């Protein structure tokens, strides 16, 4: 039967029987007219129920605050919702009638169930009902209940703390072994509630424990994954279901490594990488005849970390392959003061025991200790007296064939003599001093002057390293003729 409307809600929204307003007219079970409907609510956090429900059953976590957020609407189009209130069991602080900004609908209405109300997991049957009242501007109340029907504990978590990883082996080397460890962590509330951690390898059969270890043994080419589930249990209470975590163990054939022999190369240490090829579990080389790239790195450092050792000279060598002879000349790919690197293409042999041999050809470079303990500082050998306008020849400490002096000047405050050297070449150990100025010598001062020097090393990569300091050997006592 269709609804019978007595006019519109604007001009005939109220029907009174005497002083009492009639809110519903029914013909048997059929609703034919309704007015001044009570506001309705629906929970949005947690998302429970729908508009029109009178009760909203929820679950909570043991000993935890729970924020309830709900919305309200009124089916009377001209009504607005103006306030709400919440009452509850002992231990709950009621929310008094709270005015809100009038609206229809309204959202974001809230109250909090405190963590002191439900401290035991299970299914509460008393002191678990909260009454929510929403009121419209005509004073019509909608009264609804929020009922806690279950108290659960936070679930445990499981994680892999030490995975199986990977291993390599050939079939002839037998099987490989590995172990993995999982750790189950229960939240404080779960442990305090008396729950016990359990684990399972199939999510069906369970064992008690919070630390899980598993050993595997497999052959080359094999792979196996172990997944572990976790949960927290307590007799007579709801089980807290946790997550799962997995670890995989796999074994594959190792790379075949080909030894590399270097001849006539200058280096302190070396690094040779990439001279490898894939092979089967049976030890057969894969893709023989194809080309791979290896890298040969030569370093100047010999391992004495207190001394700075660098490649000096004019140029690095090229590499020439000796066995098997396929790439005649390989130029340096990267050059620096302390490293030279070669990118070396090579053909993968079919013999897993093959060896590659290379020689350094050409170039002019060497390792030079440029600073550090035990490295000779510059100093003039022997003491001579000079006269202004004259020249003297003297020897210097040998700093190697790649060092060049650029200046040598007096710097002593008591001896103001000034002298310069003529332009020496790299590796100079004997220079000529030209005396240019008379210095004053106190009769009480018999010390012999020291000098300052500057110069540079030439690097095999084309750069330079500047150096300067004071001589520690004797220099000159300059007098007037």
Image (cartoon, helix red, strand yellow):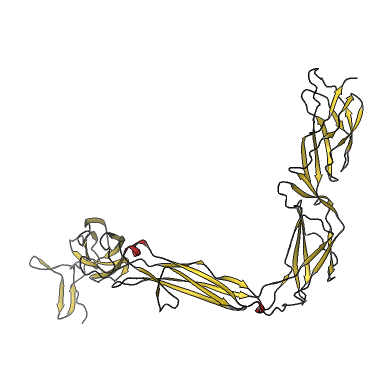
Please, which residue is most extreme toward the top here?
443
| Snapshot quadrant of residue 170 | bottom right
Above or below residue 477? Residue 182 is: below
- Decide which of 428, 442 is in the foreground and name it: 442
- Decide which of 17, 330 is in the foreground and name it: 330
| Snapshot quadrant of residue 196 | bottom left
**Residue 187 position in % (x across, y down):** 38, 63
- Decide which of 210, 313 is in the foreground and name it: 210
**Residue 194 position in % (x across, y down):** 32, 66
- Give the residue displayed 77% in from the left and 37% down from the top: 468
**Residue 297 position in % (x across, y down):** 75, 59
Above or below residue 79? Residue 382 is: above
Residue 2 appears in the picture as rendered: yes
| Snapshot quadrant of residue 445 | top right
Above or below residue 159? Residue 286 is: below
Quadrant (top left/top right/bottom left/bottom right) for the N terminus: bottom left
Residue 107 appears in the picture as rendered: no
User: Total number of numbered labels?
Assistant: 0
**Does residue 58 appear left or right of residue 401 in this picture?**
left
Please, which residue is most extreme toward the right here?
390
Please, which residue is most extreme toward the bottom here?
1
- Give the residue displayed 78% in from the left and 68% down from the top: 345
- Decide which of 16, 101 is in the foreground and name it: 101
- Give the residue displayed 72% in from the left and 79% down from the top: 284
**Does residue 302 appear left or right of residue 227 in this picture?**
right
**Residue 57 position in % (x across, y down):** 26, 70
- Give the residue displayed 38% in from the left and 67% down from the top: 155
Quadrant (top left/top right/bottom left/bottom right) for the C terminus: top right
Above or below residue 267? Residue 388 is: above
């Amino acid at each position: 039967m269709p609804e019978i409307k007595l006019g519109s809600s604007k001009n005939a929204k109220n029907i009174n029987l005497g002083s009492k307003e009639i809110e519903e007219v029914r013909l048997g079970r059929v609703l034919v007219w309704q007015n001044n409907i009570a506001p309705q609510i629906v929970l949005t956090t947690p998302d429970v129920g729908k508009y029109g429900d009178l009760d909203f059953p929820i679950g909570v976590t043991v000993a935890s605050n729970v924020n309830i957020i709900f919305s309200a609407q009124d089916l009377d189009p001209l009504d607005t919702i103006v306030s709400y209130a919440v009452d509850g069991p002992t231990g709950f602080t009621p929310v008094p009638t709270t005015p809100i900004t009038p609206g229809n609908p309204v959202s974001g209405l809230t109250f909090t169930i405190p963590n002191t109300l439900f401290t035991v997991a299970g299914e509460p049957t008393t002191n678990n009902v909260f009454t929510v009242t929403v009121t419209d501007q005509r004073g019509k109340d909608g009264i609804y209940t929020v009922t806690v029907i279950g108290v659960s504990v936070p679930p445990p978590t499981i994680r892999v703390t030490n995975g199986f990883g990977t291993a390599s082996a050939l079939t002839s080397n037998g099987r490989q072994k590995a172990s993995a460890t999982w750790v189950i962590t229960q939240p404080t509330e779960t442990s305090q509630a008396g729950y016990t951690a359990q684990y399972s390898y199939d999510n069906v059969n369970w064992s008690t424990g919070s630390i899980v270890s598993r050993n595997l043994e497999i052959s080359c080419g094999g792979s196996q994954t172990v997944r572990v589930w976790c949960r927290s249990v307590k007799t007579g209470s709801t089980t807290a279901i946790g997550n799962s975590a997995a670890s995989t163990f796999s074994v594959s054939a190792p790379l075949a490594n080909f030894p590399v022999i270097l001849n006539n190369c200058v280096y302190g240490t070396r690094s040779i990488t990439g001279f490898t090829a894939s092979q089967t579990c049976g030890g057969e080389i894969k893709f023989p005849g194809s080309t791979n790239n290896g890298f040969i790195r030569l370093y100047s450092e010999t391992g004495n970390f207190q001394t700075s050792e660098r490649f000096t000279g004019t140029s690095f060598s090229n590499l020439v392959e000796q066995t098997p002879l396929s790439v005649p000349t390989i130029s340096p790919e990267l050059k620096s003061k302390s490293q030279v690197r070669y990118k070396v293409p090579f053909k993968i042999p079919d013999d897993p025991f093959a060896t590659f041999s290379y020689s350094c050809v050409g170039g002019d470079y060497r390792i030079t200790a440029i600073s550090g303990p035990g490295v000779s500082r510059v100093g003039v050998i022997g003491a001579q007296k000079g006269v202004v306008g004259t020249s003297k020849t003297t020897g210097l400490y040998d700093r190697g064939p790649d060092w060049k002096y650029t200046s040598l000047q007096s710097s002593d405050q008591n001896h103001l003599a000034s002298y310069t050297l003529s332009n020496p070449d790299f590796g100079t150990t004997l220079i000529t001093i030209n005396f240019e100025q008379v210095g004053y010598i106190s009769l009480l001062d018999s010390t012999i002057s020291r000098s300052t020097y500057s110069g540079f090393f030439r690097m095999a990569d084309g750069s330079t390293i500047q150096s300067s300091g004071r001589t520690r050997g004797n220099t000159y006592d300059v007098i007037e003729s």
